[in-house]
Amino acid sequence: MKIIAIGRNYAEHAREMKSEVPTEPVIFLKPDTALLREGQPFYLPAFSSEIHHEVELVLKICKEGKHIAEKFAPKYYEEIGIGIDFTARDLQAKFKAKGLPWELSKAFDNSAPVGRFLPKTQLGNPDNIDFHLDINGNTVQKGNSRDLIFRFDFLISYVSQFITLRKGDLIFTGTPEGVGPVKADDRLEAFIGGEKLLDLKIR
Ligand code: MG
């Protein structure tokens, strides 16, 4: 499986990063070794002193497809979950300053914890899903998929023009504003609506 992630997909987050609001999706990949399964702690890596949380809605691809038309995109995912796109912000800033790919700041081991998934039928309109992240009981990020610059169906269609999607692939759809650092002993809890789907300890 592979993880496809979308950058700067909420205008307010693009602004907080002092990045332009994109006119086309910003895409990057995380390898399968980035996946951190539910129940496992996240160990702060030695190569960074600034790991940021980015809470994101995650689509689970349910069948293979390429060149998917936007109107057929809903057939390619049946479940939606929540995950964290951990980012070594200090490394990313260095790579960005040099105009280099920022792959290593995003694709490192365990940088993609993912919680439980819910059937999308249970969630109603996919373009109106509330989600949030609490750290140690305080809400630090809050979003709704209605504020996505590029919505789920468009993303599936767009990505599949370039990369074949396969069953089990995950699409991280972008983070709302409020990203920030995590530290040892933090507890991250991520919710869709009122339902907690991810409970993660930082070590
Ligand atoms: Mg992200």
Image (tube, grey):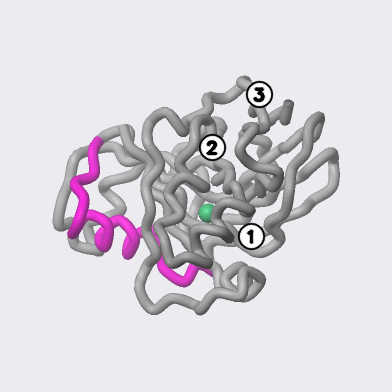
> Residue 22 at what x, y percent from top left?
44, 76
Q: Which percent across, then down, holds residue 33? A: 42, 28
Distance of mark 1 from mark 3, alpha carbons? 24 Å
Q: CA distance from mark 2 to mark 3?
A: 11 Å
Residue 86's place in the image compared with 199, above or below, is: below
Residue 88 visible in the snapshot: yes
Question: In the image, which residues are magenta?
Answer: 147-166
What residue is shown with label 3?
A: 41
Name the mark on residue 94: none
Amino acid carrying label 1: it is Gly
SS label for mark 3 = loop
Which mark sits nearer the N-terminus, 1 or 2? Answer: 2
How far apart, in angstroms, are the residues tagged by discs 1 and 2? 21 Å
Residue in the foreground of this view, choosing between 60 and 31: 31
Foreground disc of the pair 1, 2:
2
- Callout 3 amino acid: Pro
Residue type for callout 2: Ser
Residue 156 colored in magenta in the image: yes
Left or right relative to 159: residue 192: right
